[in-house]
Amino acid sequence: MKKTLILVLLSHLLFAQKKADNKEWVRIFNGKDFTGWDIKIAGQPLNDNYKNTFRVEDGMMRMSYDQYQTFDDKYGHIYYQKPYSHYIVRFEYRFTGNQTPGGAVWNNRNSGIMLHSQSAKSLTMEQTFPMSLEMQLLGGLGKGKRHTGNLCSPGTQVYMQGSLRPAHCIDSDSKTYDGDQWVKAEAIVLGDSVIHHIIEGDTVLTYNKVQVGGGFTGGQEDWKFSKMDEAAIEYWKQKDGTALKSGYIALQAESHPIDFKNIEILNLSGCKDPKALNYKSYYIQSEPSACRYKKKKS
């Protein structure tokens, strides 16, 4: 009887540990519609999907331009409505076809995922890009190297190996991915402390101490490219040097057709109390208010 009881207790402990270790990935794009997402395109009101730029087809989120005559600086982003601080986001992407006429040369097979972004609702009408950290996605052009998983920093700045890196875009050391092939990517985001960019399982870029600052694209006088209104520019200038601890995730549309699929989040913030029902061993950031416990019998 005693041995049986011990085996039962061990079984419960092993089950509890397995449950605590089981990673609860959440698919934030349902493959059917844009539930949970907001669209903001430069010059258009919130959730005005100008010329059907953002679409859902065959389980994919697609950024398409077949209804455009010319791009006309209609930089667009689609924002997941829930902010995060510590998390892993993973997805697959592919570039397709040709760039839309009128798109900038540097936007050929160019897109990205914005990390720690401001919300869609907070952008001003004409604003081109959100204040964020962009994990830049680039497709090969059929000749030479063209890295992906780079960092671009609209309105933000980062440190690498203890030094401030003021450049607007920082190259990764990824491979080049030519053609219309699917590429697997993920970002590990740990508040303002460290962020890793991963392409096809390889960590291609790491940076830390992320913060607001450095102007919009690398200088204090370059805010005109943001096309923000003056009040918004002044607001962000006042936050120069502020740690960027959390924000929204957004996917980019900037003139070249691109598809995304299997977009998932693993939240790394939550209950770290092993006595709680929803304890997870992989949580990094503690949120005591999230803990749930068994009700005591009266």
Image: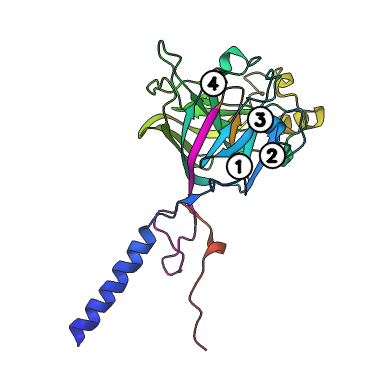
Q: What is the crowding at mark 4: few (fewer than 14 residues within 10 Å), some, or many (at least 20)?
A: some
Q: Name the residue under label 3.
A: 76
Q: Distance between the residues labelled 3 and 2?
A: 10 Å
Sequence order check, earlier mark of 3 and 2 = 3
Assign a secondary structure to mark 3: strand
Q: Mark 4 points at which residue?
A: 169
Front residue of 201/235: it is: 201
- Labelled disc at residue 248: 1
- For marks 2 and 4, give the one nearer the viewer: 2
Q: Horizontal placement of 201 versus 2: left or right?
A: right
Quadrant housing residue 202: top left
Q: Distance between the residues labelled 2 and 4?
A: 23 Å
Q: How far apart are marks 4 and 1 (CA)?
A: 20 Å
- Labelled disc at residue 120: 2
Q: Say whether residue 239 is magenta.
A: no
Residue 166 drawn at (x, y percent): 56, 21
Q: How far apart are marks 1 and 3 (CA)?
A: 15 Å
Residue 291 drawn at (x, y percent): 52, 65
Identified at 31% across, 73% down, the residue is 12
Q: What is the crowding at mark 1: few (fewer than 14 residues within 10 Å), some, or many (at least 20)?
A: many
For the record, the magenta segment spans 258-282
Circles 1 and 2 in contact, beta carbons < 8 Å: yes
Tell me the kind of residue under disc 2: Ala
- For marks 3 and 4, give the one nearer the viewer: 3
Sequence order check, earlier mark of 3 and 4 = 3
Tell me the kind of residue under disc 3: Gly
Circles 4 and 1 in contact, beta carbons < 8 Å: no
